[in-house]
Amino acid sequence: MRNFIHILFAALLITGLGFLAFITVPVQRTEPQTALADDWRPEEGQGEYAMRLADCAACHTAPDGELFAGNRPIESPLGTIYSSNITPDEATGIGGWSLDDFRAALYDGVRPDGTHLYPAMPYENYRKLTEEDIRALYHYFMEELEPVENRTLQSDLSFPFDQRWGLRAWKWVALGDPGFVADTDDPVLARGEYLVEGPGHCGACHTPRNNLMAEAALETPDEAFLSGGEIDGWTAPPLRGPDSAIRGWSAQDMAAILATGRNAHAAINGEMQLVVRDSTQFMNDEDLQALAAYLVNLNDGSTAPDRAEETETEALLVSADPDMPLGPRLYLDNCNACHFADGRGADEVFPELDGSSLVTAQSPTGLISMILTGSELPSTAERPSSLRMPGFGDRLSDEEVAELASFVRSAWNNGAQPVTPAQVAELRGDAEAKRD
Amino acid sequence: MTPKFLQSSRRGFLGGTAAAAALTTLAVPARAQVEVVPLDRYQPDYLTAGEWAFVMAACARIIPSDGDGPGAIEARVPVFIDRQLAGDFGAAADLYMEGPFNPGSDAYLGTQTPLTPARIYRDGIAAVDQWCTDNLGSPLAELEPEDQDTVLRALSSGDLNLGDELREFWALLVQNTKEGYFADPRYGGNHGMQSWIYIGFPGARANYLEWIGRNEAYPLGPVDIAGERA
């Protein structure tokens, strides 16, 4: 009996010590993946360009705040996370961070003091950054940027998710190998692959999350990678496979939407607007072409889904029959002027609704939000006009929005499930709460 | 990759303002039919009782009710005018009003009066009513329709001269009457989209491309900016 107590005591002690070590022993930081000379310097503009590729601005700048001074609220299913100040301010930013500190944040998701960063910071993806890009980013944030004093808010997560030490175990499961290895011999495709998997962190939204809320796949060969995810309730459409939102798009279509937010088929919406506004529109032609080639290749040259040219929907709308059901009638009264009876809109101005990934997404959140509050394209150097769709929330009741959304989800060649007024009411409430 | 379809700035403007409005006033959809106050019980925002009677009478002669379509009164044009005068239009909020003013200058030089539209109505109505009282025994609103027409004709021809500062009064009155007749109902006139129905305008639906060139009537009634159908 005494033996048993001894053993139990010893076991508890070991577990306790292990636990303590788990919490307190510093994380082993990942080494640089390439040895660069100490006096390596980025070329003029290289640092800023790397910042654009990694789209640091979108999250690290508050809606009306100073660039990179943090405090943008990022809604997660577990609570609100506030982005940090990444200007070189000593007291409130990352001033004083060494290159190794900086790399550890990008690769291992830890601060210099060992605190684990929430994976809202996409270090799952940044782990693939080249040492050149890390050094360029470091140079940009430390030497090219002015410090801004701005203390950021404490993230507001509920127990147990506010216990950051737990992230250590999460990282064992979630993180892949550091560094980037291309899945192709083609240098153009490899560049595109790097941009997507690494700095562009496209998978953070476009790849589904697993049970642990980690990206289900981090690399191109895995078919789960870029197979569609969700961001803030909106669907980040699949970029590959049979439901790919970009199936059949040409390389020009791909490049156009990344550079200008619009192309012959679609207009970007939701969070993707920030991506185009702060990141992809600044890509040079070479990178745009590489990205476009990668995306075309990812869709394996598959052609656009077959769509009937002449549809019952179009015939009904063109008939202007006063006895038509409420759904198509609301479409005629509210949408038809721009999106037209054939649901094909107009190139680079009015997105197509027939076959639109926003319209037919499994979750109607994006579509309902779009009808209620509208949307505005970012102004880009190549297409400066920030085209706007007005919101129809003040014009249509919940029942009418539901009728209209249900109609467009099943119109032309679309075949998505209907929407209920309750779903509309909930999103209308959210939109109002956000505004107040 | 040239866009097939370059939008006119007007649509952009309408969309823009609608979006801005949507962002600020998402609140309750304006579906509920607001009870419409009959014109004889309407409480004007800007016009005095006498001025209201003048505008009612003048509008009723400019677009009379006994023609083919609705008259200015059925379309509630006086409400439109009163609300415009009470707002930015009446206050000349969008006009350059710093002078120098030279009201007597050539009409081709545009408006040169120091008075706001609201003031032009106030002084113009007072001057015309004074003239009517002096010459015909009562204010315009109390005259027989034939006499009202005579006065308005004199005003339009310039025979009834109100002076340089008020010389735009008649043009404003006619212009605002037309605007109130055809503008979207949200501004108080074109009640029930009656003028749109009358001329076959589909309203804020703005697209019936497939019907252009077809020699038959477009079957659907108009829609206004608030989404109401008529």
Image (cartoon, coloured by chain):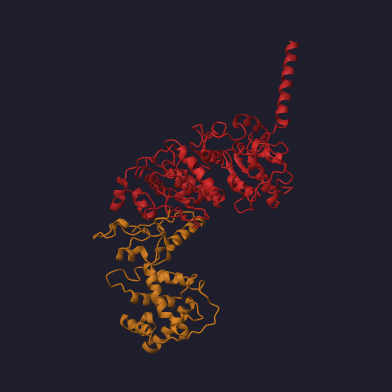
User: Which of the image's four quarters has the C terminus of chain B?
Assistant: bottom left
For this orientation, the residue located farthest to the bottom is: B135
Image coordinates for residue B115, horizontal then vertical, percent: 50, 80
Q: Is residue A56 left or right of residue B152?
A: right
Indicate the chain coloured orange by its letter: B
The residue at the far left in this view is B215
Q: Identify by letter the chain in red.
A: A
- Numbered marks: total: 0
On the image, the x and y values in percent for residue A1 come to 73, 10
Closest to the observer, A260 or B186: A260
Question: Residue B227 sits in which quadrant?
Answer: bottom left
Q: Is residue B216 left or right of residue A177?
A: left
Which is more toward the observer, A382 or A34? A34
Residue at 65% from the left image edge and 37% from the top image edge: A107
Q: Is residue A71 visible?
A: no
- State left or right for residue A426 relative to residue A92: left
Taking B95 as reference, is A314 left or right? Answer: left
Residue B138 in sight here: yes
**In the image, residue A200 above or below residue A347:** above
Residue A101 sits above or below residue A378 on the image: above
Q: Nearer the viewer, residue A361 or A110?
A: A110
The vertical placement of A46 against B78, above or below, is above
Q: Horizontal and vertical percent for residue A101? A: 71, 39
Q: Where residue A293 appears, x then y in whole percent? A: 48, 42
Q: Is residue A126 above or below residue A399?
A: above
